[in-house]
Image: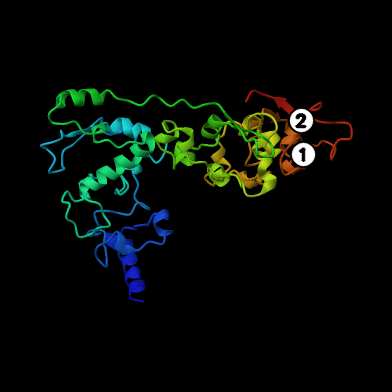
Amino acid sequence: MKKIFLFIITLVLLTNVNGQVKKMGTSHSQKALICENCHSCSIPTKENPCLRDCPRESIATTKQKPEEGPDIIVINKLKGNQDIYKEVTFSHRLHAEMSEMSGGCVTCHHYNPPGKIIGCDNCHNSSRKREDVNRPDLKGAYHRQCMDCHREWSGGVECSACHQLNTKSPSKEKLITGTIKKSHAKLETPEKITYKTPKAEGKTVVFFHKEHIDLFGLDCQSCHSNDGCVKCHDQRPASAKPKMSVELKHKACSSCHDTKVKSNCVTCHNDKETNGFNHLISTGFNLNSYHSKLSCVRCHTTPGKFTGLNKNCNTCHGTWTKEKFNHKVTGLVLDEIHLEFDCESCHTNPTYAKPECSSCHDDYTYPAFIPGKKVKR
């Protein structure tokens, strides 16, 4: 009861400070959040929100383009090894470019206030002696991030992969110059990828990669969120590579396609290569010149879901009337007689498809008879 009372008081304060309305974001209000995770006091206010240093990753994210960050970062905050190793010159931009294929910035910057990049030592103490053993010290955090990825990629985690001995060249200046020039090869988007599935009914699966990006608006993370460098740069022998289960193979597709229903298999699995997406063939709804210019999300407003919609025009456009609708946009200016009719007099179908003349005319049909004059759209 006390927590509920404090929560209500907090909402009142946030809503009425200085007479201004303070609305909580949709994602914030719909999550089952524990106030103490982000706020160190019982009643945060606008003037004193008493935010903790480390908002949880579920509501605080970081997303920048690789070129918006630094080219390199010199890591020199670790103590105790200066007599052995040089400072680590970390190729930040190169790693940022590689991370775009999977988790993006949050791969390393897993706890960040929105719009702000905080250093690792903001949360991870440089001292190896720590009270909270659940949180790695700075050295442990660095090595965990680097070694987990490098171990997957090459199978080795030699110190020399990142560290240069003090007794060896090159100089710090040469290391920086060489690192700045490093850049990942530009990722080319393939038109399609063809998979062979010998154990499945329908042994050919064609994934139209470019179509899913350009047409359906997916980004790399939509499918590759759990992938890393090893996806493309796996140097392990085939015998050492783990075999993927059917469920794991379907995981990326399952977010949009129901792969658990067997009757849906033919959506992807066929005996021969299929063509790309055709709205008329797949849905029975012809986009024509009007809707073909729109992005999918203008009609399919739920992110990642392209389920069937009601084909009636008023589903999206409301009720059309002769006063509200300029018929000229269709390429046909109605004559004075037909201009007075209600839309339903000619368009008896709620999809406003081919008009019907028979309700008034026995010997006229469209398009042999046109109720007006054609114009350029």
Of residues 322 and 160, which is closer to you in this image? 160
The quarter of the picture where the C terminus appears is top right
Determine whether label 2 and label 1 are within 8 Å by CB: yes
Depicted 106 relative to depicted 181: above or below: below
Q: Position of residue 98 (x, y in %)?
A: 37, 33
Q: Which residue is mark 2?
A: 371
The image quadrant that residue 56 belongs to is: bottom left
**First-in-chain label (2 vs 1):** 1
CA–CA distance between discs 2 and 1?
10 Å
**Residue 103, position as x, y percentages in the image:** 39, 41
The local secondary structure at tag 2 comes to loop
Residue type indicated by callout 1: Cys
Q: Which residue is mark 1?
A: 346
In depth, the one of 359 and 282 nearer the eye is 282
Could you say which is closer to the camera, residue 202 or residue 290?
202
Q: Residue at x 46, y 39 (%)?
A: 224
